[in-house]
Structures are given as C-alpha cells and as structure tokens.
Amino acid sequence: MSEGARPALDILEDIEAIIRTYPPLRESRPHLTIDVSDSGVVTFRGNLRSGVMRRVLIDSTMQVPGVTGVVDEELHD
C-alpha cells in the first residue's frame, strides 16, 4: 500500500454503506461481489436490476476517498 492510501477494508466499508443507504442497491446486494485491491481499484461482479442502479453504484464508488478506479466488466444489469 502506498503512503497516504486508504486500506482496502475501509474503502469496502464505505461502498457497503452506499449500498445500505440506497434501497434499490440494498435489494441487489446478495447478487454482488465487491473486491478492493490495495491500490484502490474496486472490482464489481454480479447483477443489478437496472442501468440506473449500475450508474449510481459506479458514480458513488468513484467518490469514495481512496478509490483509484472501477472495473465493472462483470457487472450486469
């Protein structure tokens, strides 16, 4: 982990909080897998109900301190 980088667990906790506070995402949580690398790259896999939910999740994730990128090729709506 580089100096000043946030721990992956802290980033994951912030993303989980986003999911908990947005009811449509909360309903999709059982169908998502989230991995956070030590470099701050977040990888989503799984299914969401709509493209809007996908956009909200990705846009919100990019606002989380410490996130350096999002990989969503295996995230389907």
Image: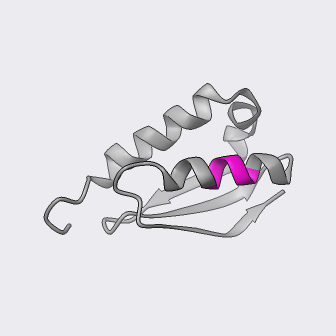
Q: Which colour style is shown?
A: one colour
Quadrant hosting residue 58: bottom right
In front here: 34 or 66? 66
Residue 55 point in image, percent of width and height: 72, 53
Q: Is residue 37 left or right of residue 77?
A: left
Prevailing secondary structure of the magenta residues: helix
Q: Is residue 71 magenta?
A: no
When the figure is inspected, residue 4 is found, relative to residue 19, above or below; the finding is below
Q: Which residues are magenta?
A: 54-58
Residue 19 point in image, percent of width and height: 60, 36
The residue located at (68%, 32%) in the rendering is: 26
Q: Is residue 5 left or right of residue 67?
A: left
The residue located at (13%, 64%) in the rendering is: 3
The quarter of the picture where the C terminus appears is: bottom right
The residue located at (60%, 26%) in the rendering is: 21
In front here: 67 or 45? 67
Q: Is residue 74 left or right of residue 2?
A: right
Q: Residue furthest left?
A: 3
Q: How many marks?
A: 0
The residue located at (41%, 66%) in the rendering is: 68
The quarter of the picture where the N terminus appears is: bottom left
